Image: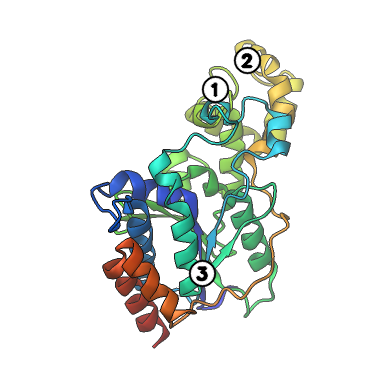
Amino acid sequence: MPTTQKLLLLDSASLYFRAYFGVPDSIKAPDGTPVNAVRGFLDMIAQLVGDRRPSRLVACWDDDWRPAFRVAAIPSYKEHRLAADGGEEVPAALTAQVPVIVEALEALGIARLGAPGYEADDVIGTLVAREVAAEDGRRAQVEVVTGDRDLFQLVDDEAGVSVLYPVKGVKNLQVVDQAALQERYGVPTGTAYADMATLRGDPSDGLPGVPGVGEKTAASLLRKHGTLAGVLAAVEAGEVSASQQAKFRSAWDYLAVAPTVVQVARDAPVAEVDDTLPDTPADPDAVVALAERWNLGSSMARLVDALTRVGA
């Protein structure tokens, strides 16, 4: 079973996008550069550290927002988010702030991890898998902070893995455990959520799903047949209605590859680092310099104070 220690995993892009759109862009550096995403992201971490009191924390990063292995499986994956240059369509004012966030995390000594060719979701999935595989007594409770419901698939009460989903910022978090999955989606586990998501699809990610099969129908099929594999076996055996058979047959090619896209990787090449939450900044001078250059003084101070309090 997990110890009383807590590992907090941040879906960083999900959070700094929310900060960018949730904090007024009138917040600027002395040179006029918007820093609303930076300030909002640092304030989020300060709030999370103070409220959740983790002993370890990792800011998980998208080294590749649209991995080749997912595009090869389903070419429409995130296709609608492509910019003219082939990268992700992101507001220029946010793009300019991401390097500042990176510098701030480095100066504070907060671990930041990505993996070449993988999304932050896969980094989180891999770190969760490593923690779950740790010996009893050394395994920490894991809380994943994300605004992306895809990561609900990691929820596992027995392993001590839950998701913290921002409702209105990180001051108001929905704790997603297996009971919450059952109540909201009618599925009993994180694995079942992934199966449901595969059947349902997700237009926001360019995943078509099975035509006419929404959350309720998908959950009903999974309750009856257990797993995605069980549902597909029932279709093959003619144990579903003729109309459902037709829907599934039309999506057979999609269903053959969709799990590769929907399920997060558990074995991404994520480096081993010291993810202990620092109680003092790694580089105090850099913290001061960044605060002055980018008008981050109050946000930096709140986060440094939160680190100190948790470490006391």
| Vertical placement of residue 221 versus 166, above or below | above
Answer with left or right where residue 278 lies relative to residue 131.
left
Answer with left or right where residue 11 lies relative to residue 266.
left
Question: Which amino acid type is marked by label 1?
Answer: Val
Give the SS element for disc 3. Answer: helix
Pointer 1 local density, CA inside 10 Å: few below 14, some 14–19, many at least 20: some
Tell me residue 252's x, y (percent): 72, 20
Report if the CB atoms under discs 1 and 2 are less than 8 Å apart: yes
Q: Which residue is mark 3?
A: 106
Answer with left or right where residue 241 lies relative to residue 49.
right
Of the numbered discs 1 and 3, the one sitting upstream in the chain is 3
Of the numbered discs 1 and 2, the one sitting upstream in the chain is 1
C-alpha distance separating marks 3 and 2: 50 Å
C-alpha distance separating marks 1 and 3: 45 Å
Question: Which amino acid type is marked by label 2?
Answer: Lys
- Can I make out residue 259 in this image? no
Tell me residue 100's x, y (percent): 44, 59
Tell me residue 128's x, y (percent): 62, 61
Question: Which amino acid type is marked by label 3?
Answer: Glu
Q: Which mark is residue 247?
A: 2
